Amino acid sequence: MTTHGMFDLKTQALRAHRWVLMTVLAILLGGCGFQLRGQVDLPDSMRLITVTSPDDTTDFVRELSAQLRANGVQVAKSATANASVLRIRQERSYREALTISQDARVREYILYLEVRFDFLDADGQPVIQNEGIRLSRDYSFNEQAILGSSREEEILAKDLARALASMVVRQLASQLSDLSSNPPAHSSIHQENTLQ
């Protein structure tokens, strides 16, 4: 047998071992409840959702719809029979000065993104009402590099939209799972959370 032939056998054996190892690892991780980041165990009431918003072109709404789809939710474009409704009541983005220098110039800003939403079941009954979540990120501001600073703010805004969308999906999954295992005495829940 040539050296090249022995090399091919070793390579094939290594590939076979890697494949077996990857398969065993996947089975073990799946068995212990491991999920890839972004994957949420959603209740059946979230399998078909219509997302409504005053402005459905924002980064947050687009990211929210994408994350719902990534978690196996069918997102309807318009009101659909048997669809739950995730109603975005308000989405607000703003910034405030965080640090001001001795010469009265802003050195750091804090960027906020907050959202308020309701969740209605397929019968149109409110399940979650007026829920609020707010996230923030701070960043340095250099008026000498205004283009770089504004680009940094754009990147942070997209990051906030992604993080807030993920929090909304997780919040919905958590609250709706809790409701399905412990139904409330009345038909609606009023909670208000503000996270920074």
Image: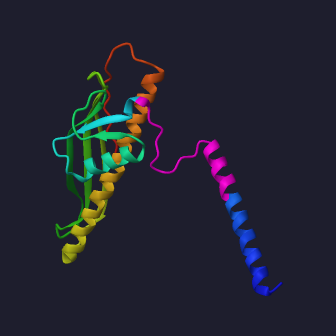
Q: Relative to the observer, which residue lies in front, 152 or 40? A: 40
- Most extreme residue toward the right is 1
- Most extreme residue toward the front is 1
Query: How far across and down, in percent of the image, does residue 102 sit?
Result: 21, 68
Q: Classify residue 77 by image quadrant.
A: top left
The quadrant of the image that shows the N terminus is bottom right
Give the residue drawn at x 36%, y 51%: 163
Q: In the rendered structure, which segment of residues is drawn in magenta?
A: 22-44
Number of disc labels:
0
Q: What colour scheme does the image use?
A: rainbow
Give the residue drawn at x 37%, y 47%: 67
Q: Classify residue 46 by image quadrant.
A: top left
Query: How far across and down, in percent of the image, does residue 23 sit?
Result: 66, 54
In the image, residue 25 lies in the stretch drawn in magenta: yes
Q: Relative to the observer, which residue lies in front, 94 or 162? A: 162
Give left or right: position of 175 versus 2: left
Placement of 146 over or under 92, stated as above or below:
below
Query: How far across and down, in percent of the image, does residue 79 sit?
Result: 22, 33
In the image, residue 89 lies in the stretch drawn in magenta: no
Query: How far across and down, in percent of the image, does residue 135 sit?
Result: 32, 48
Give the residue drawn at x 26%, y 45%: 114
Placement of 43 over or under 65, stated as above or below:
above
